[in-house]
Image: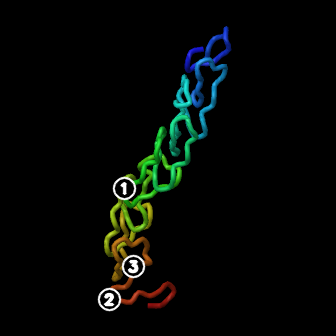
């Protein structure tokens, strides 16, 4: 058989299926390493590249893309999420990178610090104003960080104001 095909001598050769490789003279397809894939007709383990959400050298087992990065298919190194964003492990697209708590912005783009007088939970593309007569420092992540302004009283939950 020719490279990218397999079969027994004297019989018709078959194209190597996707997810396998068939070196010259192969009698059967060889499976690509874990978390990699190849195209039909591949003839070398180097044709086995990482699948989406994983990264690694061609022809070797691919590792899960770590948290805070993304790994499109055929990625050798994990790509870091933009500034002030994060992602789950196994992410495969830049748009999987969402704003961290205390920041806001469009997924896949560097996030902006939450402004004074507001708070920004994680994964938000907008900020939330603090309740009336309260304020918070820049970068606040939750409503609990909104405190009463001077001259005002903010009752605790369950208290009568």
Q: Classify 10 Å Cα crowding around label 2: few (below 14), some (14-19), many (20 and above).
A: few
Which mark is on residue 146? Answer: 3
| 28 sits left or right of 59 in the view | right
- Residue found 43% across the figure and 54% down from its top: 97
Look at the picture and state if 44 lies above or below 36. above
Circle 3 sits in a helix, a strand or a loop, which is it? loop
Q: Quadrant of the C terminus?
A: bottom left
Residue 33 x/y as whole percent: 60, 36
| For marks 1 and 3 on the same chain, the one whose residue lies earlier in the sequence | 1
**Cα gap from disc 1 to disc 2, whole angstroms:** 34 Å
Q: Quadrant of the N terminus?
A: top right
Circle 1 sits in a helix, a strand or a loop, which is it? loop
**Cα gap from disc 3 to disc 2, whole angstroms:** 12 Å
Considering depth in this image, is 66 or 17 the residue closer to the camera?
A: 66
Mark 1 = which residue? Answer: 106
**Cα gap from disc 1 to disc 3, whole angstroms:** 24 Å
Q: Classify 10 Å Cα crowding around label 1: few (below 14), some (14-19), many (20 and above).
A: some
Look at the picture and state if 60 lies above or below 86. above
Residue 35 x/y as whole percent: 58, 40
- Residue found 62% across the figure and 14% down from its top: 13
Residue 37 x/y as whole percent: 55, 34
Mark 2 = which residue? Answer: 150
| 2 sits left or right of 127 in the view | right
């Amino acid at each position: 058989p020719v490279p990218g095909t397999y079969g027994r001598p004297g019989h018709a050769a078959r194209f190597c299926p996707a997810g396998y490789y068939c070196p010259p003279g192969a009698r059967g397809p060889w499976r690509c390493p874990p978390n990699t894939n190849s195209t039909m007709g591949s003839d070398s383990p180097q044709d086995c590249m990482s699948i989406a959400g994983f990264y690694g050298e061609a022809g070797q087992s691919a590792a899960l893309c770590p948290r805070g990065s993304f790994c499109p298919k055929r990625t050798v190194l994990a790509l870091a999420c933009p500034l002030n964003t994060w992602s789950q492990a196994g992410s495969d697209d830049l748009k999987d990178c969402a704003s961290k708590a205390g920041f806001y912005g469009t997924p896949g783009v560097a996030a902006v610090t939450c402004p004074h007088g507001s708070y920004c939970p994680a994964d938000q593309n907008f900020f939330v104003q603090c309740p009336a007569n309260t304020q918070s420092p820049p970068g606040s992540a939750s409503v609990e960080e909104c405190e009463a302004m001077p001259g005002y009283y903010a009752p605790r939950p369950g208290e009568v104001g």
